[in-house]
Amino acid sequence: MERTLVLVKPDGVQRGLIGEVIARFERRGLRLVGAKFIQVGQSLAETHYAEHVGKPFYAGLISYITSAPVMAMVWEGPNAVAAVRQTVGSTKPVEAAPGTIRHDYALEVGRNLIHASDKPETGVREVGLWFKAEELVDWNRAVDAWVFEK
Ligand code: IDP
Ligand code: MG
């Protein structure tokens, strides 16, 4: 089953939207396998956003993600990465489709509420970066057969 990393970023936490984000992924049928509420340090932030080093928004991005606690989660399901990105919406909130989290709760790219892994390989790397193996829970839900075809 594919896994993806989701972060409710500091703005989402400060605005009381953790529950709203979790509710959307639960309703979609995804299965939560890990969660922790943490203050992100400089080194984790820099490793996580390494692909953006050198871009004009990089310094602001690191200070944004380290500015206050985040809610880090791992969700799984068939095509979990694509499904979560779809529910999250485009990076720029004003380009995100109506009904997506970024459309419904954000206006600016530098305050876009949420992170989600962009590809299955990224999901594997990011889940490994943010969570130890023993922090992830393998479990089955009674409704799984009604959400997952196989
Ligand atoms: P993603 O979060 O949709 O995957 P990325 O392009 O990977 O988008 O960018 C990572 C994060 O960097 C974005 O979510 C956003 O917070 C921030 N970011 C991206 N582009 C800009 C920008 O032009 N100005 C300010 N922040 C940006
Ligand atoms: Mg990205």
Image: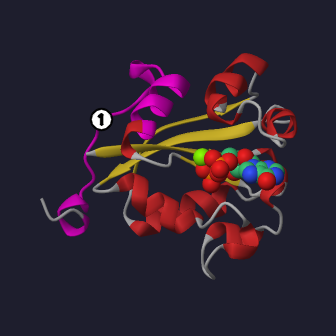
Q: Residue 109 occupies which quadrant of the picture?
A: bottom right
Check disc 1 and give the amino acid type: Asp
Span shown in magenta: 122-147
How far across and down, in percent of the image, does residue 129 sit? Answer: 52, 24
> Is residue 10 on the magenta stretch?
no
Residue 96 appears left or right of 112: left
Q: Is residue 108 above or below residue 115?
A: below
Q: Residues within 10 Å of mark 1 (few under 14, many from 20)?
A: few
Q: Residue at x 78, y 67 (%)?
A: 106
Q: In this view of the protein, can residue 115 be seen by the observer?
A: no
How far across and down, in percent of the image, does residue 108 sit? Answer: 83, 63
Q: Outermost residue toward the bottom?
A: 98
> Is residue 134 on the magenta stretch?
yes
Instruction: State the colouring used for the structure image.
Output: secondary structure
For the C terminus, the quadrant is bottom left
Q: Secondary structure at mark 1?
A: loop
How far across and down, in percent of the image, does residue 26 sit? Answer: 46, 61
Q: Is mark 1 within 8 Å of ligand 2?
A: no
Residue 60 appears left or right of 121: right
Judged by its main secondary structure, the magenta piece is helix
How far across and down, in percent of the image, does residue 123 sit? Answer: 43, 39
Q: Is residue 115 above or below residue 122?
A: below
Q: In this view of the protein, can residue 46 be seen by the observer?
A: yes
Q: Residue at x 69, y 36 (%)?
A: 52
Q: Which residue is mark 1?
A: 138
Q: Residue at x 45, y 38 (%)?
A: 122
Q: Residue 1 occupies which quadrant of the picture?
A: top left
Q: Is residue 115 above or below residue 89?
A: above
